[in-house]
Image: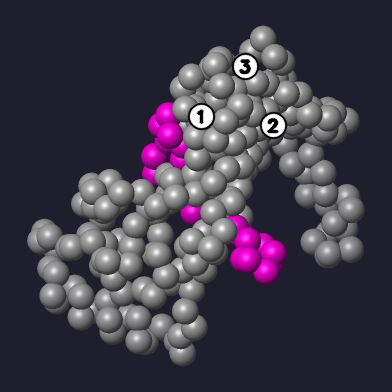
Amino acid sequence: MSQWTPPPDDSLGRLADLRVSYDAGTLEEPDLAATPLAQFRAWFDAALAVGLPEPNAMVVATAATSGQPSARTVLLKDVDERGFVFYTNYGSRKSGELDANPGVSCVFPWFAMHRQVVVVGRAERVSRAEAEEYFRTRPHGSRLGAWASRQSTVIDGRAGIEAEYARLQAEFPEGGEVPIPPFWGGWLVRPVSVEFWQGRESRLHDRLRFVAAREGAPLDDPAPWRIERLSP
């Protein structure tokens, strides 16, 4: 795999010189798994095997009803035949936008492997039971943090949220149960397409995309998915 070579200096004027030759691999149609779920799991396992930091980090893009987009990085916490699941505060900007406009896109930026996975679909809230089951697996501090934060709201500084966290530590000491906040839960992204992007030399990248014949197609069934090659 090619190593990144820094420019002669770190000035923004050298941005045009920053580039990497993508020569880590190829992605041909015969190499593709039969289903988007199998292909994602194969690439995810490869990312784990090479020690890629936080391979479950994904950029989630949403849009307000006005059309204004917003994006942020979250952590994938489950993937199955339904789609991709992440958790967040239901009062956050992303949740408000998804409630109003469930169209969503997710990107797994596995730059070190010269790969990306791009998911396009529609989001829906997971069941309360599913959210509660996951919440119980979180570290104690993360559970308290979910209560302490009113995500995306404007605050004056850290003092208030740290004081609330300390209050919660006293109310719910380590080792005890922490109930799930009523304003916290998960989102399931049901894909309508899943693109697998492999960087190639001279920017002639391989882009193979699974496209669903119908909304809600299971990711582990090859029948409702067709495969397209996109021009780089």
Figure colour scheme: one colour
Which residue is rendered at x = 72% and y = 20% of the image?
Answer: 26
Q: CA distance from mark 2 to mark 3?
A: 12 Å
Which mark identifies residue 197? 2
Instruction: Name which residue type carries label 3.
Output: Leu
Specify the farthest residue to the left.
Answer: 176
Q: Quadrant of the C terminus?
A: top right
Specify the segment rendered in magenta: 62-84
Instruction: Name which residue type carries label 1.
Output: Ala
Instruction: Label 1: state its secondary structure.
Output: loop
In the image, which is nearer the foreground, mark 2 or mark 1? 1
Which residue is rendered at x = 44% and y = 46% of the image?
Answer: 188
Residue behind mark 3? 32
Image coordinates for residue 231, horizontal then vertical, percent: 83, 30
The front one of 1 and 114 is 114
Which residue is rendered at x = 39% and y = 39% of the image?
Answer: 78
Image coordinates for residue 28, horizontal then vertical, percent: 71, 15
The front one of 161 and 134 is 134
| Among the 4 quarters of the image, the one containing residue 203 | top right
Q: Is 67 part of what is drawn in magenta?
A: yes
- Horizontal side of residue 214 vs 76, given as left or right: right
| Among the 4 quarters of the image, the one containing residue 1 | top right
Instruction: Name which residue type carries label 2.
Output: Trp
- Horizontal side of residue 47 vs 80, given as left or right: right
Image coordinates for residue 8, horizontal then vertical, percent: 85, 54
Image coordinates for residue 158, horizontal then vertical, percent: 41, 83
Instruction: Label 3: state its secondary structure.
Output: loop
Residue behind mark 1? 217
- Residue 73, visible in the rendered structure: no
Among the two numbered marks 2 and 3 on one chain, the one whose residue lies closer to the N terminus? 3
